[in-house]
Image: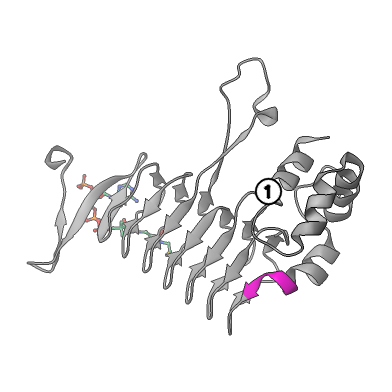
C-alpha cells in the first residue's frame, strides 16, 4: 500500500461518522485499497469531486454567510473535521487541506488570495491572513538518512492562531506554533516559535519588534539587545 493510503487510513480514526464501517475497512487490506481508490484518484492528494460535492457537506460545518471561493481548492476529506465560521471568507487560489489534521476557522476571519492551510490548524475569530501565507501543521520526517524523505513518517503538530491576529503577505507559520491574540506578523516572516499576544514579530526567524504596553497604551519598540 502506498504512503497516501496509509496516511488517510491512519487518520480516518479521527472523530467523524460511521466508526464501525471505518473499523471494518481498516481491518482489511483489500477494503482499504478500494476505499482509498474511491476517495482519491491515483497519484493525487485531493479527493474526488463526488466526495467534495456529496459527502463533505454532511460532515463539515459552514456558518452563515461564510464564503469558500469557487476558485479555492477544497482538499477536504470527510473523515477529518473542517469548519468555516460565520462571515468568514476563503479567497481565490487558496488551498485548504484537512487530510492529516482538522482545519477549524472561526468567525469573520479572512484567508487571503493564494494562501495554503494544512491541518491540524485552528484559527480564531476576526483574523486577517494576507496573500500567499502558508500555515502547515505538517512536517516530513528526515531522520533516516537511508530513506527518501517522501517515504518517512509525517510529524504533525497543531498550530493555533488566536483571535484578531494579522499575518502579513508571504508569512510562513511552521508546525506546533501558537500565535497569541491581536499579534501582528510582519510581511515575509517565518514564525518558528510561539508569538505572545499583543506583540509584533518580524523576520526569519520571526522576532519581537514591538509589544503593547497597557500602561502607556503604546506599542513599545523592542530592540535586539532588549530581549
Ligand atoms: C509590521 C508592519 C505592520 C510595520 O509595523 P511597524 O510597527 O509600523 O514597524 P516599523 O515600520 O516601525 O518597523 C520596526 C522595525 O521592524 C522592521 N520591519 C518592519 N516590517 C518588517 C518586515 N516585514 N520584515 C522584517 N523587518 C520588518 C523595520 O525595518 C524596523 O526595523 P529597525 O528597528 O531595525 O528600524 C509592516 O512592516 C508589515 O509587515 N505590514 C504587512 C503588510 C502586508 O503584508 N500587507 C498585505 C495586505 S494585508
Q: In the image, which residues are magenta?
A: 57-61
Q: Can the viewer see residue 131?
A: no
Q: Is 54 or 12 nearer to us in this picture?
A: 12
Q: Residue at x 83, y 42 (%)?
A: 43
Residue 135 drawn in magenta:
no
Q: Residue at x 76, y 53 (%)?
A: 46
Q: Can the viewer see residue 58?
A: yes
In the image, 177: left or right of 39?
left
In the image, 64: left or right of 212?
right
Work out which residue is located at the far top of the displayed protein and give it: 146
Give the x, y percent position of residue 206. Answer: 33, 44
Report the image quarter containing ligand 1.
bottom left
Question: Dot 1, crowdedness within 10 Å: few (<14), some or many (≥20)?
Answer: some
Q: Residue at x 58, y 84 (%)?
A: 64
Task: Tell me the colour scheme of the image.
Answer: one colour
Give the x, y percent position of residue 197. Answer: 28, 59
Q: Quadrant of residue 102?
A: bottom right
**Residue under numbered circle 1:** 11
Work out which residue is located at the far left of the displayed protein and give it: 215
Give the structural element (helix, strand or loop) at label 1. Answer: helix
Residue 58 drawn in magenta:
yes
**Which quadrant would the C terminus be assigned to in this image?**
top left
Q: Quadrant of residue 97?
A: bottom right
Type of secondary structure dominating the magenta stretch: helix
In the image, 143: left or right of 202?
right
Q: Quadrant of residue 61?
A: bottom right
Give the x, y percent position of residue 41. Answer: 86, 50
In the image, 226: left or right of 81?
left
Q: Residue at x 25, y 57 (%)?
A: 199
Amino acid at each position: 500500500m502506498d504512503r497516501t493510503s496509509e496516511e488517510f487510513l491512519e487518520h480516518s480514526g479521527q472523530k467523524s461518522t460511521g466508526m464501525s464501517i471505518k473499523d471494518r475497512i481498516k481491518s482489511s487490506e483489500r477494503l482499504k485499497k478500494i476505499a482509498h481508490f474511491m476517495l482519491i484518484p491515483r497519484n493525487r492528494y485531493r479527493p474526488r469531486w463526488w466526495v467534495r460535492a456529496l459527502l463533505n457537506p454532511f460532515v463539515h460545518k459552514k456558518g452563515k454567510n461564510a464564503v469558500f471561493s469557487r476558485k479555492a481548492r477544497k482538499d477536504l476529506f470527510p473523515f477529518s473535521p473542517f469548519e468555516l465560521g460565520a462571515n468568514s471568507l476563503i479567497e481565490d487560489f487558496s488551498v485548504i487541506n484537512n487530510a492529516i489534521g482538522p482545519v477549524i476557522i472561526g468567525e469573520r476571519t479572512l484567508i487571503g488570495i493564494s494562501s495554503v492551510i494544512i491541518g491540524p490548524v485552528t484559527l480564531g475569530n476576526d483574523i486577517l491572513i494576507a496573500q500567499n501565507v502558508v500555515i502547515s501543521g505538517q512536517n516530513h520526517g528526515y531522520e533516516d538518512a537511508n530513506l527518501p524523505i517522501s517515504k518517512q513518517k509525517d510529524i504533525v503538530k497543531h498550530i493555533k492562531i488566536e483571535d484578531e491576529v494579522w499575518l502579513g503577505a508571504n508569512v510562513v507559520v511552521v508546525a506546533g506554533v501558537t500565535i497569541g491574540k491581536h499579534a501582528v506578523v510582519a510581511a515575509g516572516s517565518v514564525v518558528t516559535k510561539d508569538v505572545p499576544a499583543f506583540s509584533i514579530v518580524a523576520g526569519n526567524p520571526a522576532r519581537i519588534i514591538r509589544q503593547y504596553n497597557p500602561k502607556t497604551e503604546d506599542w513599545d519598540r523592542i530592540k535586539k539587545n532588549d530581549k
